[in-house]
Amino acid sequence: MNQKGGVGKTTTSVNLAAALAQAQRRVLLVDLDPQGNATMGSGVDKRGLAKTVYHVLLGLNELAGARVHMERGGYDLLPANRELAGAEIELVELAGRETRLKEALERVAEDYDYVLIDCPPSLSLLTVNGLTAAHRVLIPMQCEYYALEGLSDLVGTIKRVRAHLNPQLEIAGLLRTMYDPRNTLSQHVSQQLEQHFGDKVYRTLVPRNVRLAEAPSYGVPAVLWDQASKGAQAYIALAAEILAQGQPA
Ligand SMILES: Nc1ncnc2c1ncn2[C@@H]1O[C@H](COP(=O)(O)OP(=O)(O)O)[C@@H](O)[C@H]1O
Ligand SMILES: [Mg+2]
């Protein structure tokens, strides 16, 4: 989650899902963004899907009937498309509007070791559903001058969700994305993040890497498209780092 767009949320979700699946974990990836980028990047055509996360949130379909298994990626996907934008408005009228995703996921919890939720770039009701359903929040951040701007709003939202909806919610870590080691600003911001947030910063650095950017156009996670690439290797290392931390209780 990060309410900024273009920081690597979807790239992280899709590649982490594939990397955890490669490590023999049972993974569900939930696309919670009406842009449907995680859906397309997984190789599912978002147009004309009959059952999506939208139908699950509105209680029109069970999650078990809407998920799709990704043969290549090795994980399950709960897809999304533009229809999800309407859920923002339609949910407001419904009971338990913040806990809809949580309740749907509880019914399939036994099927998975990890559930990854790719949030939209906003602090919207959809995002609140994601945060209410989650144990932990991974925050991808680009190592640029404005990286920290907006972080306090995000932390404020996390605190509010913790106080009212999900007491166990915690920040898993900050993930540095699109890192360019030749860029001194990139190095500087990266060091500042380490100084301020200590062990809440993942050791793994995701470099700027063209394979990560081009893989979505082939509908395959970069982890499978070019496993040897620096970008894929970073996400495989991130998966190992997360597996080493163990699962939340
Ligand atoms: N490490 C990276 N190196 C190069 N391009 C990247 C990297 N991470 C993401 N991108 C590209 O940057 C753009 C934004 O990334 P994306 O994951 O969609 O961000 P978000 O989901 O936060 O909006 C996409 O075009 C993506 O392919
Ligand atoms: Mg995205």
Image (spheres, rainbow, N blue to C red):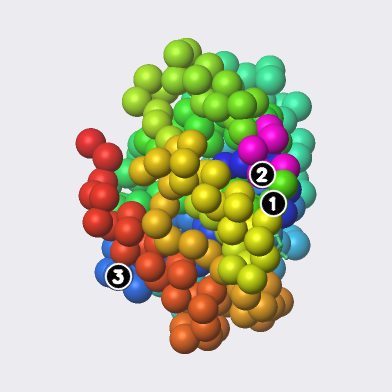
**Amino acid type at image mark 2:** Ala
Residue 17 placement (x, y as % from top left) = 44, 62
Which image quarter is the C terminus in? top left
Residue 50 placement (x, y as % from top left) = 66, 55
Q: In this view, does 57 lie above or below 138?
A: above
Of badges 3 and 2, nearer the viewer stands 2
**Amino acid type at image mark 1:** Glu
Residue occupying the point 33% across, 55% down: 242
Of badges 3 and 1, nearer the viewer stands 1
The answer to which quarter of the image holds residue 135 is top left
Distance (Cα) linking label 3 and label 1: 32 Å
Indicate the secondary structure of the residue bearing disc 2: loop
Residue occupying the point 46% across, 70% down: 234
Asked whether residue 23 is in view, the answer is yes
Query: Does the magenta run of residues contain 149?
Result: yes
Which stretch appears magenta?
146-150
Residue 195 placement (x, y as % from top left) = 47, 41
**In the rendering, which numbered label is found on residue 223?**
none
- State yes or no: Cβ of the residue under disc 1 lies below 8 Å from any atom of ligand 1: no
Pointer 3 and pointer 2: residues touching (CB < 8 Å)?
no
**Amino acid type at image mark 3:** Ala
At label 1, counting other C-alpha atoms closer than 10 Å, the crowd grade (few under 14, some 14-19, many 20 or more) is some
Pointer 2 and pointer 1: residues touching (CB < 8 Å)?
yes
**In the rendering, which numbered label is found on residue 144?**
1
The answer to which quarter of the image holds residue 125 is top right
Q: In this view, does 3 lie above or below 12?
A: above
Tell me which secondary structure the magenta stretch mostly adopts. Answer: loop
The front one of 47 and 170 is: 170
**In the rendering, which numbered label is found on residue 147?**
2
Indicate the secondary structure of the residue bearing disc 1: loop
Look at mark 3 in the image and give the residue it sits on: 23
Q: Which of marks 3 and 1 is nearer the N terminus?
A: 3
